[in-house]
């Protein structure tokens, strides 16, 4: 059940990435998708048990697997920085494209590409 | 050797962060780092025709954090070093305040090195993500030394940078899911454990790497990005950052027979898809960019020669991107050497790489790629015959010394093509055949009445391409393999 919810979150996020027209919404959908992936890792880590993996000799418990948790920490940090960077880029784009609709940005970019493909 | 390797992997990042504190050191450390990489690659057997014993470092216990440097990776490292060295010399001329870019280039260089030598899934993931952040910053840096870009062109660069970052982040999320599925099944993250991974996990990992490597439909992001980027940044992209994903894919396929079965189809698909769109393109930059998608198919065609092919392509494309952007007479040797190597004229490194790769393939795959080479030759002729477009802001007719150095570094590398194994009669025959058909075809191409077509390269198409590739690769890998796994 939990597994299905996580997979559903990932798919909803990906669906939003494809379908949403607005750049901010696309980035938010990407965040939903990456939250799903993080939960996916956490669930697999909890397969063997749910207790924090700090070993104490007097505790006979089912510990969670620390490796996926460790990995996903790295991925969370990377995801956060990528999103921050993208939002900064979007802020700069919004100066001339205040609606941030993907289509309008792309039309502007494409019409400029024909005339000035060699300038830089 | 172990210590040297570890220092060499970590050094670019250390230097990059140090130079934030001591900006005066930026340029010397970038040039020095690139030279060190060249020396390291040569020492590890990266020069065409030499070999060295592969080096394997097991850094952590059974979770499989591993580095592996073999001749295949070393050839690619040589390309990293040479391209970075050439581009490092260009930065001052092309960009105002180039120190920031030099730091970014150090980070990009270091993370590309790390991708090529890592042999576990998570190191590859982290390095690829760092790579894409660095590439984004290189792409979107707006301050040019000569001829400030217009608002539109700056915005265009920002947009392609965002598109690249968006695409690569989504693709890497799939990769992460694949990695955890491999871990759950095998208890290790080393690439060697991919042998026991199930097709779903393999498909997800492959999609991440295909998107980063711009292979097949997942490479839809590439052409607009290369065309929009500054020629020098396009040289970095086409020289090694895009190949990093392909090299990781090749390394995965060495461990996993299931993936190795699917690789020829991806290679053929990418080669044909890229060349068809390249033939329909109109400007030299578009031609070259689409031809990169096609050449990525050649890189992954024969895994044992991927590094050599990557080196040949990674030296030819920067030369071509820089050559098409200048107007002085030195552009002709640049363009000639680059196109000759791309088309596989005997004597060039491109010929040797192509001959060795093709002779290791199945017949259907081999002849398909020979056919694609005809198209590549045709493209080369069209690039040479394209009118020289005067650049805005470039008024001086004197040849900058950077162009000469680049020609010596990259063009000289391309002449290093004398590998006796590549000069069999059948290989020469194939090369002459493709040249003989391709050159006239390219010469008369403009007279062929053909409607120029194009594909949608928008963000939605790029992300949609990813999902199509995911389904295709999953189907490709799952057919016949689901029941037979250990």
Image (cartoon, coloured by chain):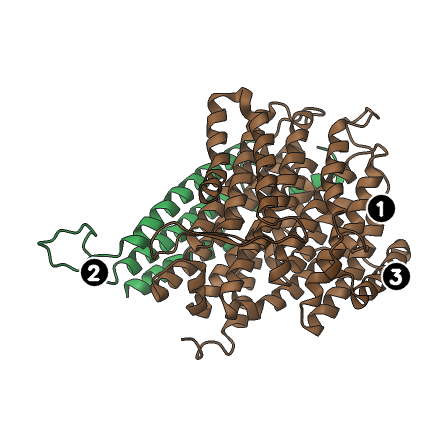
Mark 3: few/some/many CA within 10 Å (<14, 14-19, 20+)? few
Residue B291: x and y in percent read: 72, 53
Mark identifier at residue B384: 1
Q: Which residue is mark 2?
A: A49
Circle 3 sits in a helix, a strand or a loop, which is it? helix
Mark 2: few/some/many CA within 10 Å (<14, 14-19, 20+)? some
Camera sees residue A112: yes
The residues tagged by marks 2 and 1 sit, at their Cα atoms, a distance apart of: 65 Å
In which chain is the residue bearing label 2?
A: A
Front in this rendered view, residue B178 or B160:
B178
The quarter of the displayed image where residue B142 is located: top right
Camera sees residue B230: no
Residue B8: x and y in percent read: 50, 39
Q: Which residue: 53% across, 58% down?
A: B251
In which chain is the residue bearing label 1?
A: B
Residue B56: x and y in percent read: 46, 53
Front in this rendered view, residue A59 or B292:
A59
Q: Chain B appears in which tint?
A: brown
Q: Chain A appears in which tint?
A: green
The residues tagged by marks 2 and 3 sit, at their Cα atoms, a distance apart of: 67 Å
Q: Is residue B240 above or below residue B419?
A: above
The quarter of the displayed image where residue B101 is located: top right
Marks 2 and 3: same chain?
no
Left or right for B150, reference A12: right
Residue B463: x and y in percent read: 55, 54
Mark 1: few/some/many CA within 10 Å (<14, 14-19, 20+)? some
Q: Which residue: 55% across, 20% down?
A: B24
Q: Which residue is mark 3?
A: B436
Q: Is residue B179 above or below residue A85?
A: below
Circle 2 sits in a helix, a strand or a loop, which is it? loop
């Amino acid at each position: 059940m939990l597994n299905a919810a996580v997979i559903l979150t990932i798919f909803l996020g990906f669906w939003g990435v494809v379908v949403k027209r607005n750049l901010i919404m696309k980035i938010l959908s990407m965040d939903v998708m990456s939250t799903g992936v993080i939960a996916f890792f956490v669930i697999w880590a909890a397969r063997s048990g749910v207790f924090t993996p700090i070993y104490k000799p007097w505790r006979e418990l089912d510990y969670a697997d620390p490796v996926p948790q460790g990995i996903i920490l790295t991925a969370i940090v990377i995801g956060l920085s990528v999103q921050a960077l993208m939002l900064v880029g979007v802020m700069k784009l919004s100066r001339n494209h205040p609606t941030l609709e993907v289509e309008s940005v792309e039309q502007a970019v494409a019409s400029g590409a024909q005339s000035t493909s060699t300038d830089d | 050797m172990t210590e040297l390797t570890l220092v060499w992997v970590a050094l670019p990042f250390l230097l990059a962060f140090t130079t934030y504190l001591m900006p005066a050191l930026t340029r010397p450390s970038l040039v020095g780092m690139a030279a060190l990489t060249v020396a390291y690659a040569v020492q590890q057997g990266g020069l065409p025709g030499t070999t060295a014993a592969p080096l394997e470092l097991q850094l952590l216990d059974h979770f499989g954090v591993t580095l592996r440097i073999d001749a295949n990776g070393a050839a690619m490292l040589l390309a990293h070093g040479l391209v970075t060295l050439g581009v490092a010399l260009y930065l001052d001329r092309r960009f105002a305040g180039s120190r920031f870019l030099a730091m970014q280039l150090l980070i990009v260089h270091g993370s590309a090195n790390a991708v090529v030598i890592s042999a576990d899934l998570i190191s590859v993931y982290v390095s690829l993500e760092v790579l894409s952040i660095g590439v984004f910053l290189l792409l979107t840096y707006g301050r040019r030394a000569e001829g400030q870009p217009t608002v539109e062109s700056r915005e265009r660069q920002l947009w392609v940078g965002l598109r690249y970052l968006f695409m690569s982040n989504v693709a890497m999320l799939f990769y992460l899911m694949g990695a955890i599925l491999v871990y759950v099944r095998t208890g290790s993250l080393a690439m060697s454990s991919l042998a026991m991974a199930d097709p779903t996990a393999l498909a997800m990992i492959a999609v991440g790497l295909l998107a980063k490597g711009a292979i097949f439909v997942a490479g839809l992001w590439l052409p607009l990005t290369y065309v929009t980027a500054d020629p020098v940044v396009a040289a970095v992209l086409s020289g090694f950052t895009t190949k990093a994903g392909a090299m990781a894919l090749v390394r995965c396929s060495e461990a996993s027979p299931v993936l190795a079965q699917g690789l020829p189809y991806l290679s053929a698909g990418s080669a044909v898809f890229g060349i068809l769109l390249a033939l329909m393109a109109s400007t030299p930059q578009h031609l070259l960019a689409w031809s990169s998608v096609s050449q990525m198919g050649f890189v992954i065609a024969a895994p044992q020669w991927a590094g050599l092919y990557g080196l040949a392509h990674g030296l030819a494309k920067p030369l071509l991107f820089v050559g098409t952007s200048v107007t002085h007479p030195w552009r002709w040797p640049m363009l000639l050497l680059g196109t000759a190597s791309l088309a596989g004229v005997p004597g060039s490194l491109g010929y040797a790489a192509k001959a060795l790769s093709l002779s290791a393939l199945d017949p259907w795959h081999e002849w398909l790629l020979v056919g694609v080479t005809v198209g590549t030759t045709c493209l080369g002729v069209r690039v040479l015959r394209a009118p020289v477009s005067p650049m805005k802001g470039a008024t001086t007719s004197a040849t900058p010394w950077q162009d000469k150095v680049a020609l010596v570094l990259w063009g000289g590398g391309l002449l290093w093509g004398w590998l006796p194994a590549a000069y069999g009669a059948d290989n020469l025959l194939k090369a002459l055949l493709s040249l003989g058909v391709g050159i006239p075809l390219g010469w008369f191409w403009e007279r062929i009445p053909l409607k120029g077509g194009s594909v949608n390269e928008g963000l939605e198409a790029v992300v949609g391409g990813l999902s199509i590739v995911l389904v295709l690769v999953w189907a490709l890998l799952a057919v016949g393999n689901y029941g037979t796994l250990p």
